[in-house]
Image (spheres, rainbow, N blue to C red):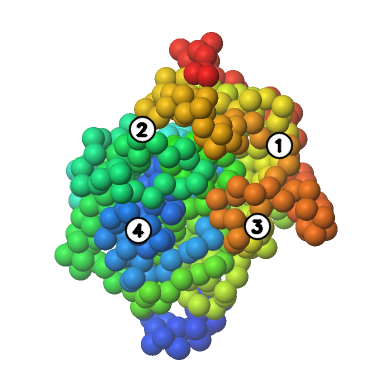
Amino acid sequence: MKGCIRLTTCMLVIPLGIAFGRQGITEEKFCERPNILLILADDLSWFDIGCYGSKDVRTPHIDHLSREGMRFDLAFTATAMCAPTRQQLYTGMFPVRNGAMSNHSKVEAGTKSLVHHLGELGYEVFLRGKTHFGPEASFPFERVKGKGLPKTTEPFCLVEASSKPHNPWPEVEGYDPATLTLPPYLIDNEETRIAMARYFTEISQLDGRVGELLKELEASGQKDNTVVIFTSEQGSAFFGGKWTCYDRGLKTGFIVRWPGRVEAGSWSNALIQYVDVVPTLVELAGGDPATIDTGRPGAPDGGRGFDGRSFLSVLTGESQSHHDYVYGVHTMQGAWVGGPYPIRSIRDDRYKYIWNPMYEKRFSNFLMVEDKLNCWVSWVRDAKEDPHATAVLNRWVQRPEFEFYDTRKDPYELSNLIDDPQHAERIAEFKKALASWMDQQQDKGIETELRNKAYEGPWVGRKVIE
């Protein structure tokens, strides 16, 4: 392995050396460029992981990783759909700016990704599993076959992009649907419980794969010089999660293990977003995120840099906070069914403000067309007889223009405080901050929504089950 890149060592190592000294971490250790293993789940709600509080799901290997690293409790993607989530994660730019805003979309030509940025620092950058990005020139990963770690003499970055627990899910194994605890934003019936048990079954399969990777890393002797990141992507496909700007859509499980650098068993309430990940990887690899050219204009400082900021100082214990706000942006254009339907949001460490510009429309997605989760038809059935089921269903399909939630008191965002006078001043501040961010991103709301290409395929014209 090559020695430490010295481009920014004088600036980087001195302050970190002070912090590391408190934990017995030496400057020389930090100068060894670590390998990076980024494990990415697919449609896994953050609260469906043992170390995040689930009493039902069994995730022993992910929980073990958390005990050996730092768990982030306020980590977010900016959009709860696969393609835009992955492309913001890999580019360090928000969806409107990088061009990959709708599902099944691609970034603008010339956009660079972590493959370029880490490659320039001497890394070989690999991917195994799900892609869902484009064009190829923007994401020229080396592909890994089989299940092993890359064979290379250079420091490596491996993205292990699982397709689990994205639906369709396997048959139930090891879970009793009748004993599960369902979140209050779902209709509790037999069909939903069976679907939940199938989803949990696949989460356990994902956890098994995490265990295999961690075991192989240790057996190879590379555990101590490898940064392992596990993140759950966006929320699950259950109604009210994915395809929304609620926390159950945008909030993500995020765990970082770096032996000797990140305190084992620690946790952080720093607000971070997926656009912060690549700047962080660049810095821990010895580079300077401020000098990076992303290939796209329109950075917050007016240049061509990242939208995100490195949170390396949070990992090393130097800082306790990161952002004041995190943002959400969503479109139903290109998502097979439901477009146009834009959503925008802003959140601090407690409160969430959501704007639904086309709130007059009834929200829908493809799960409501062919009952993909095998429970939507049962929801429609139950809503005809049960007032509570009616309220749950209506909350999903008919949104108000503005929503405001206290996520500490109301973690599932069920009690809209938008008309509460005691929050009027804070709501005004959030509106102003959201408008400022949208302006910086060149996001015109409905106009931007309609600029996104509508879905053109076999689902066009199919009717939602009502």
Gap in angstroms between the C-alphas marked 2 and 3: 31 Å
**x, y percent for residue 73:** 50, 63
- Left or right: residue 345 versus residue 386 is right
Does 150 sit above or below residue 166?
Answer: below
Q: Nearer the viewer, residue 72 or 193?
A: 193
Mark 2, residue position:
191
- Displayed quadrant of residue 333: top right
- Left or right: residue 452 versus residue 186 is right
Residue visible at 37% across and 27% down in the picture: 374
Residue 55: assigned label: 4
Q: Secondary structure at mark 4?
A: loop
Residue 406: assigned label: 3
Residue visible at 66% across and 52% down in the picture: 405
Q: Secondary structure at mark 3?
A: strand
Quarter holding the N terminus is: bottom left
Q: Furthest residue to the left?
A: 219
Gap in angstroms between the C-alphas marked 4 and 2: 21 Å
Dot 3 surroundings within 10 Å: few (below 14), some, or many (20 or more)? many
Gap in angstroms between the C-alphas marked 3 and 4: 24 Å
Q: Nearer the viewer, residue 389 or 361?
A: 389
Does 74 sit above or below residue 78?
Answer: below
**x, y percent for residue 139:** 44, 40
The label nearer to you, 1 versus 2, is 2
